[in-house]
Every structure is written in structure tokens, then in C-alpha cells.
Image (tube, rainbow, N blue to C red):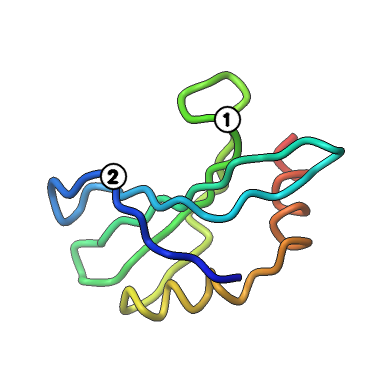
Amino acid sequence: MPAQPARYSVASPTEAILHDLPPITFDGQTIAIRLSVRRMDDGGFRGRVLFGAKDTESERATAEIFCATSEPDLWQSVRDLRAHHLRDLYRSLL
């Protein structure tokens, strides 16, 4: 899945940064997807997927299921996901 990092803000290196990903379609609805990435104290990166409109009751988030020693490695893991994987993740959060 091609994803272009779109950073909302850069504050602290350990603060999570949100990146927009291409939306998915689930049961006829378009679901917005964002990736929350943060840098760990040990220099590694962790990420979680957020589904739905930001700061709403319908927003859902995974645990930090992405873990990598570098940011490019983390993004490679994200790119390896396909739409059906994201739909399954979303369905598991409902």
C-alpha cells in the first residue's frame, strides 16, 4: 500500500506523529485511516493504526502492532499491508 507520510506536527521526538493513509471501504462506508508513529527511548519506532474520524466516538485504534529499529523499516511493514488486512483489523475492533 503506498503511503506518503503527512506529519501534522513535530514537537518532541518521543511524541506520536500522525500520518494519513489511504482510506478503506467497509460495509459500503469509507473509513479514514491514520498511522500514529512514535520514537522509543531506545531509538526504535512503534506504530498503531487509527480508524475513523479523529476524536470522535467512532474512532478505533489498534495496539502498537508495528515495531522497527528504523523509521524506513516501520514504513515497509505498513506498505506490506493490503486493504483486506486493514479491513480485518478494523472488523476486529468493532
Q: Which quarter of the rendered picture does the N terminus lie within? A: bottom right
User: Gap between marks 1 and 2, in whole Å?
Assistant: 18 Å
* First in sequence: mark 1 vs mark 2: 2
Tell me what residue is drawn at x 30 percent, y 56 percent.
38
> Compared with residue 17, is residue 55 higher up or lower down, i.e. above or below?
above
In the image, 85 versus 6, the foreground residue is 6
Residue picked out by circle 2: 8
The residue lying at 53 percent from left, 21 percent from top is 56
Does residue 76 lie above or below 47 as drawn? below
- In the picture as drawn, the residue positioned furthest to the right comes out as 27
Q: Are marks 1 and 2 in contact (CB under 8 Å)?
A: no
On the image, the x and y values in percent for residue 85 come to 73, 62
- Helix or strand or loop: what does disc 2 sit on? loop
> Which quadrant holds the C terminus?
top right
When asked about the image quadrant of residue 52, the answer is top right
**Quarter location, residue 90:** top right
Task: Name which residue lies at 30% across and 52% down.
Answer: 7
> Which of the two discs, 1 and 2, sits closer to the camera?
2
> How many neighbours does mark 1 have within 10 angstroms: few (below 14), some (14-19), or many (20 or more)?
some
Q: Where's residue 57, x and y in %? A: 58, 19
**Label 2: how many Cα within 10 Å (few below 14, some 14–19, many 20+):** few
Which amino acid lies under the numbered mark 1 shown in the image of this protein?
A: Glu
* Farthest left residue in view: 12
Hey, what amino acid is under mark 2? Tyr
The residue identified by callout 1 is 59
- Foreground pick, 50 / 42: 50
In the figure, residue 53 lies in which quadrant? Answer: top right
